[in-house]
Amino acid sequence: MDNPFLKEYHSDKTDLQLVTAANNGDKKALEELILKHQPYIYNIAWKFVRNPSDAEDLTQEATIKILTNLSSFESRSTFRTWAYRIVMNHFLVSKRKPIEDTFDDFDTMAKGLEMTPDNPLTPFEQKEKAAYIKEMNYSCMSGMLLCLTREQRLVFILGEMFNADHTIGSEILEISKDNFRQRLSRARRDIYNFMNEKCGLVNKSNPCRCHKKVTFAMDNKIIDSKNLLFNRAEYQKFKDAIKYDANEMMEIIDEKYAELYHNMPYKGDFDKRTFLEDIVNDEHIKNLMKLN
């Protein structure tokens, strides 16, 4: 996979060729362009709003915005900068999801964890419920992302999870490189401080453990054992799907929280037929782009 947020992105020319062909009505070129960038748009959306269905809606809305404006792309910037700027702006101004008001800050989340009764599991029970404990871990960490402001959240997702180059990230978000670095540093600090104070995975002196909370979560349908949202066999880990810059990682190599976020699930496989048909067969898109 060619991560569009790295300096070493080798597909700018390919993107431009696909855009040119799509603007000339080439349906296959349009499909290839969509499929190439869809995983990145979706996974940003997924981490941004936590709920997969909401992420699918955001992905489709942002993709349609890109396509309906494709004819206005003038190559004064790279396609990836232009396209992901549209994506980020759409995410920022989109209607807040209910889950965002549930996890609106770290104090609220801390109180929620404190109010969740502990039910420690034996080592045997932990092994037996390992999949659900991992789901609890991913669910909790996804909630922490929602405690960041929307602006912080996007910077953290791009800079920490997608390893975005500061120049590329700042161009996409239309802020200075210094501002991008400062926002990323602040978001990292906020996540780390919360986990260091509350999470037993980062600081062993903390009493909070996923296995102590999982029984309550399952009993109250917070985790659906028959429909896990995060811990699925078909998902990759971010660290396996995304190319990380070794020099960048040296700055945070000792941070346990960073390792945990790099192990978060990444969805790479999609029902391509359904997603594509919804977009390329949309009458407005077909007429606008004169697809053949």
Image (cartoon, helix red, strand yellow):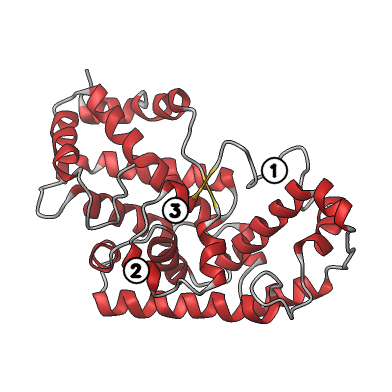
Q: Quadrant of residue 257?
A: bottom right
Relative to 79, residue 248 above or below: below
Q: CA distance from mark 3 to mark 2?
A: 20 Å
Relative to 201, residue 266 above or below: above
The residue singled out by tag 3 in the image is: 44
Label 3 with label 1: CB-CB less than 8 Å: no
Residue at 30 percent across and 79 percent down: it is: 179
**Amino acid under label 3?**
Ile
Q: Quadrant of residue 214?
A: bottom right
Q: Quadrant of residue 104?
A: bottom right
Label 3 with label 2: CB-CB less than 8 Å: no
The residue singled out by tag 1 in the image is: 228
Find the residue positioned furthest to the top: 292
Question: Considering depth in this image, is 287 or 256 the residue closer to the camera?
Answer: 256
Label 2 with label 1: CB-CB less than 8 Å: no
Q: Where does residue 242 sit, x and y in percent of width and height?
A: 40, 51
Q: CA distance from mark 3 to mark 1?
A: 19 Å
**Amino acid under label 2?**
Glu
Question: Considering depth in this image, is 157 or 94 the residue closer to the camera?
Answer: 157
Q: CA distance from mark 2 to mark 1?
A: 32 Å
Q: Where does residue 162 sit, x and y in percent of width and height?
A: 39, 57
- Quadrant location, the N terminus: top left
Mark carried by residue 248: 2
Q: Earlier in the sequence, mark 3 or mark 1?
A: 3
